[in-house]
Image (spheres, helix red, strand yellow):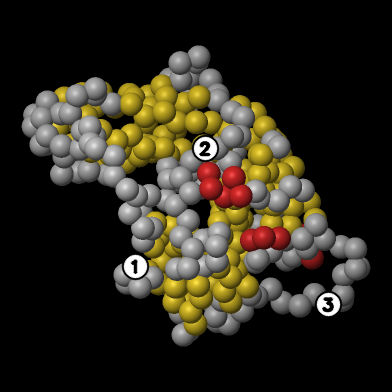
Amino acid sequence: MKRYTGVWLALALMACAAKMHARKAAAPQEPAPASPSTIVLPPKIVAGERGTLAVLDSAGRLVSGAAVDISGGGQIQTDATGRGTFVAPNQAGVMTAGLANHATFTTAIVPAPSEPAQQPPATASAASTAQADFSRIVFPQMIALGDRLTLEGAGFRGDAQLDNVFLGDQPALVLAASSIALVALPNPHTVLGKTQLSVEAGGHSLVRALVTVVALDVTGPTKLLSAGKNGILAVEVNGTDEPVAIEVRNLSPDVVRLPQGNVAEVKTSGGKTNVAKIGLSGIKTGDYAISAHLVSRGAGAP
């Protein structure tokens, strides 16, 4: 399998969401130094096992050299790729990872599976030796470019460099990993539409399945909304003509308002122009941001 290239690692420094920003014209500015903001952890990890995490800044870019405190007294530092390996505490429960700015993030620690009654053959794959609870790989049937892809099951490697996730012929960047879960970021060059999801770990093939890759395009009013003015927000899905469920989130609740709260689920129309529209009203004139993500629908593969 291909390994990650320097170009792809650079492309992965983009924000991990489909966002629409309304902004006034401004003079170019020098980019500020990356400041750690978010830790990406595998959604669950086996007690006492090794895992990989990633640190992102507020723009979704990977941060190298970030110090992360792990519950139990340990501390790690991310490498040049913005990732770092750690060892989970030995007790089931919750593991906490924290940054210097006091932001904390958690993942679930599950008990280690009991030892098998007899040793498996030397040629058996990691997936075949897992207990029944971990015998299937679960992944979304539809994947959006810019969104993180989460897989859960068994047979993965806690060191993310040993896990390979491909969409078609394009490698996804594995941000976080444990033996039972991966979090990956699709390559922005992935072709839209039906494509094969391939997952390998430690030289073993775990998944080969057909999924749909889409791109979300969010557009809003061409002019900033003043207080009391209304507009229309549109989310177009490219890559499928099937109706798609989308979660729309208002990231600027003091500037604009969605019809019902700051989070809404909408469904696209389907067809060649596959779009969903939602009302938007102004609270005060100013810059605002809206994010759109797929509502995940999972699938399993042996």
Discs 3, 1 touching: Cβ within 8 Å: no
Q: Residue furthest bottom?
A: 73
37 lies left or right of 10:
left
The image's mark for residue 124 is: none
Q: Amino acid at mark 1?
A: Ala
Residue at numbered disc 1: 103
Q: Seen in the image, is 233 located left or right of residue 253?
A: right
Tag 2 residue? 145
User: Residue 162 placed where, x, y %?
Assistant: 71, 60
Q: Which of pointers 3 and 1 lies earlier in the amino acid sequence?
A: 1
Q: For the residues carrying marks 3 and 1, which lies nearer the camera in this image?
A: 1
Q: Residues within 10 Å of mark 1 (few under 14, many from 20)?
A: few
Location of residue 224 with respect to 145 vertically, above or below? above
Image vertical order of residue 210 relative to residue 136, above or below? above
Label 2, label 1: how far apart the Cα atoms are? 27 Å
Q: Is residue 201 left or right of residue 51?
A: right
Q: Amino acid at mark 3?
A: Ala
Q: Nearer the viewer, residue 43 or 102?
A: 102
User: Which mark sits nearer the N-terminus, 2 or 3?
Assistant: 3
Residue drawn 49% across and 63% down? 64
Residue 104 % position (x, y): 37, 69
User: Which numbered dot is residue 117?
Assistant: 3
From the top left corner, tell me how far across and down residue 9 is, in percent: 57, 50
Residue at x 76%, y 78% (from the top left corner): 115
Residue at figure coordinates x 31%, y 70% from the top left: 101
Q: Circle 3 sits in a helix, a strand or a loop, which is it?
A: loop
Q: CA distance from mark 2 to mark 3?
A: 44 Å
At x 38%, y 70%, the residue is 99
Percent across and percent down for residue 135 are 72, 58
